[in-house]
Amino acid sequence: MKKADIGIYGLGVMGRNLALNFNDHEFGVSVYNRNLPGEEDLIAAFSSGEAAGTPIRTFNEVESFVASLERPRKILLMVKAGPPVDAVIDQLTPLLDEEDILIDGGNTHYSDTNRRLETLSQRHLRYIGMGVSGGEEGARHGPSLMPGGNAEAWPPVQPLLESIAAPSPEGGSCCAWMGPQSAGHFVKMVHNGIEYAIMQLIAECYQLMRNGLNMENQAIAHTFESWDSGLLNSYLLEITTRIFNTEDESGSLVLDHILDRAGQKGTGRWTALTALELGVPLPLITESVFARSISSFKDLRRQASDTLRFEAGGEPNAISTTSLREALLGGQLVAFAEGFWLLKTANEEFDWDIPFSEVARTWSGGCIIRSALLQPIATSFRENPDLPHLLLAPAFREILNAVQGGWRSTARFGVERGIPVPATTAALSHYDNLSTKRLPANLIQAQRDYFGAHRYERLDRPGGTFFHTDWTGGHKG
């Protein structure tokens, strides 16, 4: 029997659908799942269910699974990030030959990927850390794939991965090599940080329409649907419209019955923490992480709302939905700008050579943050790969100028009416900080020098020359 082109270890939702996707593209597929006592037998369920009638081969023994693969063996790991990945690698390593390839397709922290690359290279095994975005639907019909790691592993797997990835609106597939070491998982981490930000921006528009403009659900649904065009056309707006049109068995909107406590798996928090470590300001992404965190304190918020709630007076229809749309567009531009700024900084810090235009193109289809904005972003980086900050791209200057009025009105409206808009205001603060020629950091430097003799530079002296003032009696150079 001909051996399989690809093996998939892990038959959760993503693993099952990727297996079917590979099969659709006429690749030979072998699958295995490590069933723990008391857990569902996913191998049997898959074999008799979605894989029934397909040539996908299922295995109950890991040795047989590995032996079924064409050399160099290519195994895609779709298991929970963290210690489970290490356990699977330890299980597989004794069964592999030199030059075999392991691909970690989970949401792995980039530092773990670097560690595993180093360990496996010593055993002459090739390793790829690959970001996968698109959820269940993307895995089944075309995800966005962000591989990075051992460059020698890329040519053997490139035809397989490019075949199953989503098509890019610009041509080709939404799969590209991100660079050495953990560049692929880093890019996926940043993708998820941007995802947090855009979701929070949309949620704030929803709350402003519901609580600020007193709009009914049907009107909110129509507004979101009308926004899903032009530069705001995106997967997240598309599914938001669908959510507002989904009713339960009683005929009421499902959304109205969902507890307002948002979950998170950690990738957004990783983005914010990494930004702090690298000294890159990401106020929008960080505030979006905080917004999810504070939503989890439901009991505390309920208690505080009884005693601290601000009730605004006056006319409720103080702004239009056009202003909200402008705020959403401005905020989304900042979300992408923050993400690419972090990528640029990491690229320089770790010497990765991430192809920014290819990142944008890879995100333009299949993934959760796919958006019409990504095409001009890709073009901007192709025209200027050294672009210091995305908001400085000529393609966005007129847009940013055009949305200023509505963006600022939206932030003001939320603040005046006591409706939390942390992402909207953080995005605007990022824009204002970036575009302010002189910030009050000179006062902070003076304060630091006063209490800690940390010294400061002067505007009227050459850079790199530091001064200290005896603030209680004199001056020292």
Image (spheres, grey):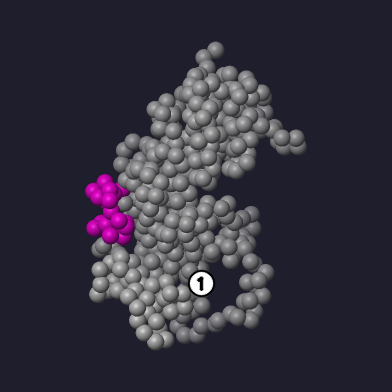
Question: In the drawing, does residue 335 fall left or right of residue 63?
Answer: left
Residue 40 in which image quadrant: top right
- At 44% from the left and 64% from the top, the residue drawn is 283
Of 122 and 235, the residue lying toward us: 122
The percent coordinates of residue 441 (x first, y second) are 37, 74
Q: Quadrant for the C terminus, please.
A: bottom left
Of 27 and 86, the residue lying toward us: 86
- At 51% from the left and 68% from the top, the residue drawn is 207
- Under tag 1, what secondary structure? loop
Q: In the orientation shown, which residue stands out farthest toward the right?
A: 38
The percent coordinates of residue 42 (x first, y second) are 66, 33
Number of callouts: 1
Residue 402 versus residue 125 in the image, above or below: below
Q: Give the range drawn in magenta.
A: 378-396
The percent coordinates of residue 121 (x first, y second) are 49, 31
- At 47% from the left and 57% from the top, the residue drawn is 277
Mark 1 nearby-residue class (10 Å; few <14, some 14–19, many ≥20): some
Q: Name the residue under label 1.
A: 420
Residue 391: in magenta span: yes
- At 28% from the left and 60% from the top, the residue drawn is 392
Question: In the drawing, does residue 306 fall left or right of residue 314?
Answer: right
Residue 108 versus residue 206 in the image, above or below: above
Residue 282 versus residue 56 in the image, above or below: below
